């Protein structure tokens, strides 16, 4: 959140616009809309196994999926394939979209995908601290966030 207008430096004020209170500039037209950042989240399968990862900041015992911001000029599908390559070194084919989810603490719009890989040969990047290929039965006992759980259900049904 900005304190001062990034355009003219005036102090921002709260103003109701389109039924939502937003930070707006009293001196110029700047409004901090606060729209979420589109973020691709990908469950990678190889056969029936599913790839789960941990990032350094995850709470102990929690597992998640490869994810990353959609870049300017990119589709969510392109971001999904690119992020998988960058984070775990796999070339994947997208199988299906698996819903969208709001993650309000970080103001993200998560766009879920299921993708298939021909190999389990992960090349771990520094963004990942741990990874595991998991069977559908084992998925049930993993500690997952709601959005990850929902994407996992699509991948294993
Ligand atoms: Zn301003």
Image (tube, rainbow, N blue to C red):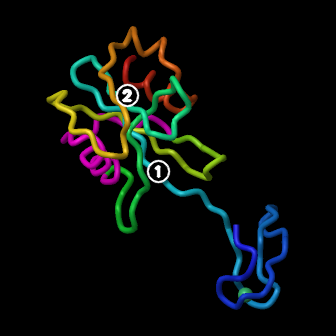
Name the residue: 19% across, 27% down: 120
| Above or below, comparing residue 47 to residue 25 in the picture | above
Find the magenta span and give its range: 78-99
Q: Residues within 10 Å of mark 1 (few under 14, many from 20)?
A: many
Query: Against 115, is 18 above or below?
Result: below
Label ID, residue 39: 1
Q: Quadrant of ligand 1?
A: bottom right
Q: Secondary structure at mark 1?
A: strand
The residue depicted at 49 percent of the width and 54 percent of the height is: 38
Is 97 magenta? The answer is: yes
Q: Quadrant of residue 48?
A: top left
Instruction: Nearest to the eye among marks 2 and 1: give it.
Output: 2
Please provide percent x and percent y for residue 37: 53, 57
**x, y (%) of residue 148?**
49, 30
Please report whichever mark, 2 or 1, sits nearer to the chain's N-terminal start.
1
* Of 144 and 79, the residue lying toward us: 144
In the image: residue 5, left or right of residue 107: right
Q: Nearer the viewer, residue 19 or 111?
A: 111
Name the residue: 59% across, 57% down: 36
| Residue at (36% x, 40% y) in the render | 128
Image quarter (top left, top right, bottom left or bottom right) of the N terminus: bottom right
Which residue of the protein is positioned furthest toward the top in this rendering?
A: 137
* Tag 2 residue: 52
């Amino acid at each position: 959140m900005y304190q001062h207008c990034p355009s003219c430096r005036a102090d921002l004020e709260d103003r109701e616009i389109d039924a939502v209170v937003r930070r707006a500039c009293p001196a110029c037209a700047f409004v901090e809309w606060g729209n979420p950042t589109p973020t691709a989240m990908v469950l990678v399968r190889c056969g029936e196994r599913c790839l789960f990862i941990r990032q350094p900041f995850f709470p102990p015992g929690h597992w998640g999926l490869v994810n990353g911001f959609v870049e300017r000029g990119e589709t969510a599908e392109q971001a999904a394939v690119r992020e998988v390559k960058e984070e775990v070194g796999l070339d994947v084919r997208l199988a299906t979209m698996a819903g969208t989810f709001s993650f309000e603490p970080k103001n993200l719009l998560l766009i879920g995908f299921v993708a298939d890989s021909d190999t389990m040969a992960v090349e771990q990047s520094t963004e990942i601290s741990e990874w595991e290929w998991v069977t559908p039965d084992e998925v049930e006992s993993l500690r997952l966030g709601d959005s990850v759980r929902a994407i996992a259900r699509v991948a294993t049904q």
